[in-house]
């Protein structure tokens, strides 16, 4: 038992050293050490290999973990065990083996309930039956004090109010703390790849070359604990080899949208009828990109599964490159996304609101203006043969992948707080009416068409990424950008310090809710309501009158 404690202490010490090391790295504002840059393909392949060597086992409590360790060790050597809880009674252990063969052994020696209603499906999600011989179980526990176990991993995003932002004296440190507490952690990423692997394994028999790949914020380095899991079904073909004389008979696919819609329906049925843990299935086949939405109960995640959206995968890689280009990119993007969420500029349901994707592009564009990250055209110019990618839909996604090869001459030493204020200032004064944002050239261009906000899609440059944004929502965004700039600036002028929480729940939100109320009433009524109609409290009327005027002009 003493040895267990010492090992735990050692592990904690190690974690603390790593945390301190990260803090030091961030303190210096220099660019990322290019030797550390991990290529996107390498990252994906490492995570996929991990998921092939892993299973997720539901246990009755944390106390069953050592028993599980002993039991599973007979299938092969165990590399890692991570325990987490979704609710009080739902305990899970992600168990990673050294070799994939151990997982196959485990599958071969696992069973299904003998119930005629149960459909026997092989999946990486299992549960651990309690052992009737308690004596044996105790003995095992005592002998296995050094198993690679990490208990009570965080799976639920903490509230920004509870992470201790107010204890830090500088805005930059608060931004780093926010990143540290809300970014997707190692276990979260592992579970997302395992969730993808569940569907991939289910389809393997009929589509042996297909892959289910996570994309979006799970892999683009801007992922948050609890953000949705975007998945894409990629049905790869073997590259033509003329020496192979035996060729598979196959069915031809009629190209086009209706075929994809039918496939989405089938995938929806598969998840609904056969795959354990997949619940709340919705087939959204009429959307611009048809998807199946579902909830994976064992990992507590909303999932969106699309078909053959290769461009989105390449987009994730592009964002990943930018997220890792400089240490200031991710804390800035996280802070801006959190700001937008806390004051209700973004919304989980798709609609006329600004999306996290558009917000991320706005931050990246600002960082291009600061010469902290390059224009996409530079990455395209520097691309070599290995970077050549043309999707099945004919979209050219060629750009330099290994950016450690890019020479970096311009040094911008601005701190995170300067950049946050700079971001709000930049867009508070931005002429959204006339200008569009192009990350490709890294400059504004003349708006090609009328839209409230125009952000050129970096990979399909004829499209506007923020076409969904309504005029009213754009107006709200503009007001909030100005409010934020004003709030930080005035606070720094007076007190020399600023608390991020003020930005998240301060004046901006209160005023914003009133603006929203007014807008809502105006748009939902034929007559223009009087300010008195809206607010009972007379003391608020003067302030609201000003706001209303601002809106009407
Ligand atoms: P969160 O889920 O909010 O954390 O961010 P996300 O980046 O994953 O956004 P979302 O789940 O909405 O979309 C997933 C991915 O789809 C994005 O990262 C983009 O690559 C792509 N995407 C989202 N919205 C658009 C859009 O309007 N146009 C295009 N072309 N791609 C989009
Ligand atoms: Mg997402």
Image (cartoon, rainbow, N blue to C red):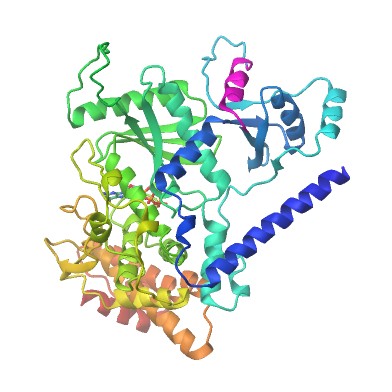
Residue drawn 43% across the image and 78% down it: 418
Residue 282 in the image, given as x and y percentages of width and height = 37, 33
Using the rendered view, name the quadrant where residue 254 is placed: top left
Farthest-out residue, left: 448
Vertical position of residue 298 compared to residue 448: above or below: above
Residue 356 in the image, given as x and y percentages of width and height = 37, 56
Quadrant (top left/top right/bottom left/bottom right) for the N terminus: top right
Q: Is residue 99 found inside the magenta-colored segment of the image? A: yes
Of residue 165 and residue 313, the one placed in the foreground of this image is 313
Please indicate, yes or no, whether residue 265 appears anywhere in the rendered image: yes
Of residue 117 and residue 50, the one placed in the foreground of this image is 50
Q: Which residues are magenta?
A: 97-110
Of residue 147 and residue 385, the one placed in the foreground of this image is 385
Residue 64 in the image, given as x and y percentages of width and height = 75, 32
In the rendered view, does 33 fall on the left or right side of 481? right
Using the rendered view, name the quadrant where residue 382 is placed: bottom left
Residue 326 in the image, given as x and y percentages of width and height = 43, 64
């Amino acid at each position: 038992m003493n040895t267990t404690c010492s090992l735990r202490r050692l592990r904690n010490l190690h974690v603390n050293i790593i945390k301190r090391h990260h803090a030091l790295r961030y303190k210096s504002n220099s660019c990322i050490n290019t030797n550390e840059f991990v290529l996107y393909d390498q990252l994906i392949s490492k995570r996929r290999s991990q998921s092939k060597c892993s299973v997720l086992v539901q246990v009755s409590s944390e106390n069953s973990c050592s028993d599980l360790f002993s039991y599973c060790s007979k299938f092969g050597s165990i590399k890692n065990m991570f325990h987490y809880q979704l609710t009080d009674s739902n305990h899970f252990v992600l168990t990673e083996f050294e070799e994939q063969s151990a997982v196959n052994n485990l599958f071969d020696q696992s069973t299904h309930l003998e119930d005629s209603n149960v459909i026997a499906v092989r999946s990486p999600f299992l549960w651990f039956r309690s052992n009737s011989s308690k004596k044996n179980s105790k003995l095992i526990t005592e002998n296995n004090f050094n198993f690679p176990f990490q208990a009570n991993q965080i799976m639920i995003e903490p509230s920004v109010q509870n992470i201790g932002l107010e204890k830090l004296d500088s805005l930059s440190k608060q931004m780093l703390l926010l990143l540290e507490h809300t970014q997707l952690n190692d276990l979260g990423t592992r579970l997302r790849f395992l969730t993808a692997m569940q569907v991939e394994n289910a389809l393997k028999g009929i589509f042996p070359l297909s892959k289910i790949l996570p994309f979006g914020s799970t892999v683009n380095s801007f992922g948050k604990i609890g953000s949705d899991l975007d998945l894409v079904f990629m049905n790869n073909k073997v590259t033509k080899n003329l020496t192979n004389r035996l060729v598979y008979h196959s069915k031809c696919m009629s190209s086009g949208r209706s075929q994809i819609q039918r496939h989405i329906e089938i995938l929806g049925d598969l998840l609904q009828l056969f795959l354990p843990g997949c619940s709340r299935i919705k087939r959204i086949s009429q959307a611009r990109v048809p998807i199946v939405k579902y909830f994976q109960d064992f990992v507590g995640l909303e999932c969106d599964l699309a078909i053959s959206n290769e461009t989105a995968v390449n987009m994730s890689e592009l964002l990943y490159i930018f997220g890792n280009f400089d240490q200031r990119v991710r804390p800035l993007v996280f802070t801006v996304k959190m700001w937008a969420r806390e004051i209700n500029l973004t919304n989980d349901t798709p609609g006329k609101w600004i999306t996290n994707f558009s917000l991320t592009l706005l931050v990246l564009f600002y960082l291009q203006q600061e010469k902290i990250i390059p224009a996409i055209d530079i990455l395209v110019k520097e691309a070599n043969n290995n970077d050549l990618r043309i999707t099945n839909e004919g979209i050219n996604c060629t750009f330099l992948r290994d950016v450690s090869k890019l020479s970096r001459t311009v040094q911008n030493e601005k701190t995170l707080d300067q950049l946050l204020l700079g971001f709000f200032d930049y867009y508070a004064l931005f002429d959204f009416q006339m200008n569009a944002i192009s990350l490709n050239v890294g400059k504004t261009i003349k708006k090609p068409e009328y839209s409230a906000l125009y952000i050129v899609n970096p990979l399909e440059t004829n499209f506007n990424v923020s076409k969904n944004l309504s005029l009213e929502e754009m107006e709200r965004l503009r007001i909030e950008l100005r409010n934020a700039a004003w709030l930080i600036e005035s606070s720094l002028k007076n007190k020399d310090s600023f608390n991020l929480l003020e930005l998240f729940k301060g004046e901006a939100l209160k005023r914003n809710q009133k603006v929203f109320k007014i807008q809502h009433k105006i748009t939902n009524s034929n007559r223009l309501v009087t300010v008195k109609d809206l607010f009972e409290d007379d003391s608020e009327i003067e302030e609201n009158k000003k706001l209303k005027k601002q809106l009407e002009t």
